[in-house]
Image (tube, grey):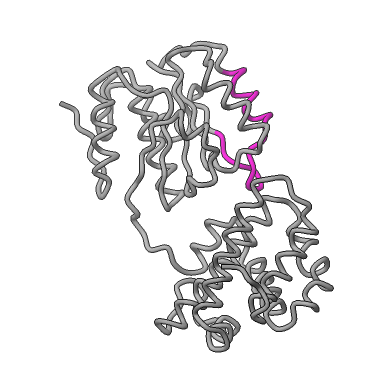
């Protein structure tokens, strides 16, 4: 038996070992984890097992396919990554065109889509058609995501979902930058605008264009901005209860939110943000959405909202 053992990942190891010793597997796999670097690393190991004509072993030397995959020089493995936090339809159409030619070296044709949650709607629809009607039965997909809730359900339903164990603590500015694709300057600008909302939400509405909408004016960028705000309130709640923060390293403005507001109010704001992040899955007027969001936060702060 050629077992595949990956430290701290018993479920993944079991699945890969079964694949390594059998020709039977799923047509699509969705790797779900907390660390994008690990997801990319494990997706490449997955691809080696699916493509290599020999049984995979560590430092495989029976053929040169595995080493070429590792170095990024195996032309028959197609990898798609988001550009500016989005994967467009053209990428999927180009992928489908490549798969009209059968594999010459590998036992399967494999493609990897990293951050599959960043597919725009037209790309997702095109991918679904490809999943439903692949040009070759030996075509296998590997998808990765750190946020399965943002992957459309019809794609998830066509995959064998592989959930990875978390290998790192989800804390600090480095983590925020990783999950939001934002720079530290952008994150700090969002915090500054949040503190304006907290201190005077009427003023925040008047400033929202120059201090917010000029920078976060697409659904994708707005999702990332809302994630920063969500983590800010989570840190405020952490500080309120435990006197520490997980993400923003004792930011004074977040301390002030914790000191001036009750746990109940902060929890209401967290729920309100989550509700609004869900609304972004649908077509919305961005300007109106942000205006309503600012007013909603302000109403909760001042105890005028009847939100639960």
Image quadrant in which you'd find residue 195? bottom right
Name the image quarter holding residue 271: bottom right
Q: Which sits in the foreground, 297 or 219?
A: 297
| Residue 239, position as x, y percentages in the image | 46, 81
Vertical position of residue 251 compared to residue 232: above or below: below
Q: Quadrant of the N terminus?
A: top left
Q: Residue at (46%, 83%) from the top-left corner?
A: 240
The residue sitting at 73% across, 59% down in the picture is 216
Q: Which residue is nearer to you in this view: 102 or 234?
A: 234
Q: From the viewer's perspective, is residue 164 above or below residue 126?
A: below
Task: Look at the image and say whether residue 83 sits in the magenta stretch.
Answer: yes
Q: Residue furthest front?
A: 306
The image position of residue 267, as x and y in percent, is 52, 72
**Residue at coordinates 53% horizontally, 41% vertically from top-left?**
151
Q: Which residues are magenta?
A: 80-98
Q: Is 282 included in the stretch rendered in magenta?
A: no
Q: Is residue 165 left or right of residue 262?
A: left
Q: Give the residue at x 49% y 21%.
A: 76
Query: Of residues 84 and 31, which is closer to you in this image?
Result: 31
């Amino acid at each position: 038996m050629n077992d595949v053992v990956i430290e701290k990942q018993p479920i993944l190891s079991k699945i890969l070992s079964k694949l390594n010793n059998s020709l039977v597997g799923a047509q699509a796999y969705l790797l779900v984890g907390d660390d994008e670097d690990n997801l990319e690393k494990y997706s490449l190991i997955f691809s080696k097992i699916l493509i290599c004509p020999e049984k995979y072993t560590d430092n495989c030397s029976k053929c040169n396919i595995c080493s070429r995959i590792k170095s990024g020089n195996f032309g028959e493995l197609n990898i798609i990554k988001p550009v500016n936090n989005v994967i467009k339809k053209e990428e999927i159409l180009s992928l489908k065109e490549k798969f009209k030619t059968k594999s010459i070296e590998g036992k399967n044709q494999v493609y990897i889509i990293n951050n599959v949650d960043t597919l725009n709607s037209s790309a997702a629809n095109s991918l679904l058609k490809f999943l439903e009607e692949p040009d070759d039965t030996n075509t296998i997909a590997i998808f990765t995501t750190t946020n399965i809730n943002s992957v459309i359900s019809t794609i998830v339903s066509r995959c064998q979902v592989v959930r990875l164990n978390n290998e790192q603590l989800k804390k600090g500015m480095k983590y925020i930058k990783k999950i939001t694709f934002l720079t530290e300057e952008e994150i700090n600008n969002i915090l500054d605008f949040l503190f304006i909302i907290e201190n005077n939400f009427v003023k925040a509405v008047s400033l929202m264009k120059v201090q917010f909408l000029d920078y976060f004016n697409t659904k994708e960028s707005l999702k990332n901005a809302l994630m920063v705000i969500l983590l800010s309130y989570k840190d405020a709640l952490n500080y309120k209860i435990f006197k520490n923060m997980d993400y923003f390293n004792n930011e004074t403005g977040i301390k002030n939110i914790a000191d001036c507001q009750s746990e109940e109010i902060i929890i209401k704001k967290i729920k309100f943000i989550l509700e609004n992040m869900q609304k972004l899955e649908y077509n919305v007027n961005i300007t109106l959405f942000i205006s309503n969001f600012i007013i909603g936060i302000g109403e909760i702060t001042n105890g005028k909202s009847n939100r639960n």
